[in-house]
Amino acid sequence: MRVGLCGLGTVGSGTVNVLRRNMREISARAGTDIIIEQIGARRDNPACDTSAENVTRDIFDVARNPSVDVVIELIGGTTIAKELVETAIENGKHVVTANKALIAEFGNELFAKAEAKGVNIAYEAAVAGGIPIIKALREGLGANKIEWLAGIINGTGNFILTEMKDKGRDFADVLKEAQELGYAEADPTFDVEGIDAAHKLVILASIAFGMPLQFDKIFTEGISTIEPQDVTFAEELGYRIKHLGIARQSDSGIELRVHPTLIPEKRLIANVDGVMNAVLVKGDAVGPTLYYGPGAGAEPTASAVVADVVDVVRSFSAAQETKVAHLGFASSSLQDYPVLPIEEIETAYYLRMTAEDRPGTLNQVTQVLSDSGISIEAVIQKEPAAGESAVPLILLTSRAQEKQLLAAVESIEALEAIQGKIAHIRVEALG
Ligand code: HSE
């Protein structure tokens, strides 16, 4: 079986190295020898030696090469990568990709094209790096109605939050290290502003609930607004702050949201640190399950790419209707469930405000919350530092609808005793 690999960056070079090193095991699992027929890359990468390979500088040569059976797309982005995948499909080739943006934004049309042509697009490496979460969700949990899932699905963001918490390091400095280690996206704002996690969550939610990919509906908030003091106050309250992607099915629709979240520190997922990812999936039959592993990096991602090559090779002779569908559910049975606007979701909240230290302030704040039907679960207030008249006031609230909470926050901000804006972070029990 002949593969053509496009893109020789971090994941591309990792894939070549893993394929070469473990060729005996990989071929034995695939049931046939796997040969790298051609590599398409604009430039060489010192991380892997391709002197013995057929290398072209035009990646489209690979998609059109009649000797190539499977095209591995590892160039990233959604313009040339989309054209490349379409060309590969038109030429009757199966595709393996690690490109979450491409699948999240254009997966619906690409899957339809692939199915019409009788080929597969495999994308395990697109979500949570080396964790076989697509396989687990799509096949391993095939008996379940999935109730919800929540995941730490951006390695760079988790690496930054962990280093800030454990070592008090500076945000920009940790991000630079993540870039050097090959974890970060070409545009690192995708990592820190939650876009990368949103791409991945949309894919997971579609597989979990059986719905077309709806990237334009997801609510996204990044980690750049998290202050070191929030990390410290959260710890004092028995919580960790993690950047989570959350998808939940309810009678009124689907919640689809990516944002920083306080999680009780006793939860396993609260202790997932560094570049590691984890996805918690609650199925009605199995209950809660947790998948953990490296979410970025050359060989962890290559591990998923190569597993997909084996899968595609094994399904070569299968009829289209007997193959595992791209989103797990047959495309004719996908349901266009409504995605709930963020104002409609209900969760608990962490609020941090700066309050004047004078009689009645706390009373006024709690009165607004009580008038809104929001209960207070915990409070932290310290004595003012010498010479200061204002203090940080931290509240944990009961569950409330987001629009109700935001209205209460606006009223509290209008109080004379409250200075500036109130920081609010959502809190999830994940129990
Ligand atoms: N930039 C991504 C991350 C790479 O940090 O998780 C893996 O998708």
Image (cartoon, rainbow, N blue to C red):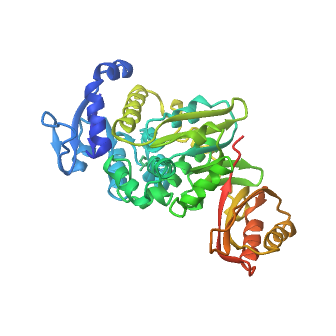
Q: How many marks?
A: 0
Judging depth in this view, the residue of 170 and 339 nearest the camera is 170
Give me the residue at 37% from left, 45% from top.
89
Q: Is residue 237 visible?
A: yes
In the image, residue 127 sits, relative to residue 308, either above or below, namely below
- Look at 60% across and 58% down and name the residue there: 230
Measured along the vertical axis of the image, is residue 2 above or below residue 274?
Answer: above
**Horizontal arrangement in the rendering, residue 365 relative to residue 128 (left or right):** right
The residue closer to the viewer here, 395 or 119, is 395
The residue lying furthest to the front in this view is 386
Image quadrant in which you'd find residue 24: top left
Residue 209 drawn at (x, y percent): 65, 44
Q: In the visual, does 59 lie left or right of 195? A: left
In this rendering, position of residue 290 left or right of residue 381: left
Outermost left residue: 51
| x and y, in percent, of residue 408 in the image | 77, 71
Q: Considering the image in quadrants, where does the C terminus appear?
A: top right
Q: Position of residue 428 (x, y in %)?
A: 69, 49
| Residue 321, percent from left and from top | 53, 33
Question: Quadrant of the image for the N terminus?
Answer: top left
Confirm whether residue 335 shows in the render.
no
Along the viewing direction, whichever of 245 and 62 lies nearer the viewer? 245
**Front residue of this view, candidates 416 and 110:** 416
Q: Quadrant of residue 390?
A: bottom right
